[in-house]
Amino acid sequence: MINDVHKHRMVLFSCEATRYFADKVVVAMNKLKQPDEPDVVLGQLDISHFSDGEFQPSYAESVRGATCFILQSTFPPSDNLMELLLSIDAAKRASANKVIAVMPYFGWARQDRKDKPRVSIGAKLVANMLKAAGTDAVMTCDLHADQIQGFFDLPVNHLYASYDFLDILKKLQRANKDTFTIAAPDMGGAKRAHAYAKNLHCPVVICHKTRARANVIERIQPIGEVEGRDIVIIDDIIDTAGTLTEAANELMKRGARSVRAFATHAVLSGPAYERIDASALTEVYVTDTIPLDPAKKDLQGKIRIVSLADTFARMILRVYNYEPISSEFPL
């Protein structure tokens, strides 16, 4: 499993918000190792919390000279990002040889440009903070925009959920081979939808969306053949689910036979669960880069979880062994 290219040992840690995911990654990594190799274990990273709201990470074991992978998705609250930054800083100060931030979900990715005067570019700021903390490389999945990789002055290992989604999509296509269609929920997702459609050799529908204001949709106009089609909407993030559910409802009004959705990151804020449950969507497939809200369990009947733990396990080992990762992703 591990080449003799270098002598640096690998250690794996997780911050608090992504411990559920890290545990699955460790199980997957142990399935990949050779019988004579020691088990991969999740190192102990303790977080001390103080009464004023501050916290301090500390490692309960030595990381000196090690290649240190730290897992943490930076979904809200912002404490999750700060915890990752402090953990990276602690590892570097403890003489880790390399620190790789494994961020299944990269928060602030939608702040990738100045779309109006006097606003921040949050994605660039986060990239700067990760470098300042001492990060040597970043591993993440389905960035909101590919050009965010250019915000970093360090290597970015960009993974895609397409590896895990395609098997499910191909099964749906076989069941509906004459009517299967890929859709983008807005113009911004057109490139992603076309990439899936090209791989699956199926038609595409693009939904043209206009907003009245932030998170409020004024109108959705589908472009392409809708009537009698079994449509799958492809997206990277579901936030309030307003765009997704309005698009699904509009597609059904225009004669679609069924509408499903595949999205990598289940942010699901505000009324998202209620909107999905009440919508025309048959199923919604999301990954486990962000945990679902246990308090909304009764509203999750349409949601299907696709785990990326196996993919991250393979990619962590490839990065550690200086092996390429691009061949793993067909889109």
Image (cartoon, rainbow, N blue to C red):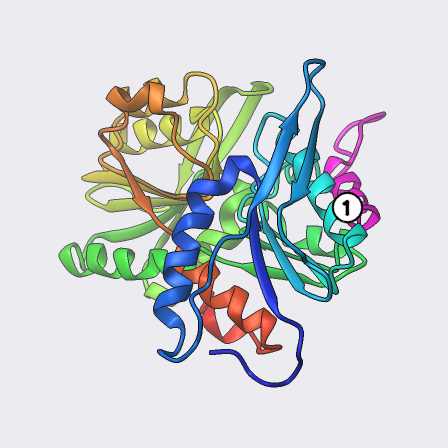
The reply to whether the magenta stretch includes residue 122 is: yes
Picture residue at 24% right of the left edge, 20% below the top: 298
- Residue that extends furthest to the bottom in the rendered view of this protein: 4
Front in this rendered view, residue 229 or 86: 86
The reply to whether the magenta stretch includes residue 118 is: yes
Vertical side of 51 occupied by 80: above or below:
below
User: In the rendered structure, which amino acid carries the disc numbered 1?
Assistant: Asp
Rendering coords of residue 2 (x, y %): 52, 78
Rendering coords of residue 45 (x, y %): 59, 43
Vertical side of 177 occupied by 212: above or below:
above
Per the image, the residue denoted by label 1 is 89
Mark 1 crowd level (few <14, some 14–19, many ≥20, 10 Å Cα): some
Picture residue at 73% right of the left edge, 39% below the top: 86
Front in this rendered view, residue 323 or 275: 323
- Residue that extends furthest to the top in the rendered view of this protein: 52
Picture residue at 46% right of the left edge, 44% below the top: 289
Magenta stretch in the rendered image: 113-134
Front in this rendered view, residue 59 or 109: 59
- Which element type, helix, strand or loop, lies under badge 1? helix
Rendering coords of residue 109 (x, y %): 65, 40
- Residue that extends furthest to the front in the rendered view of this protein: 61
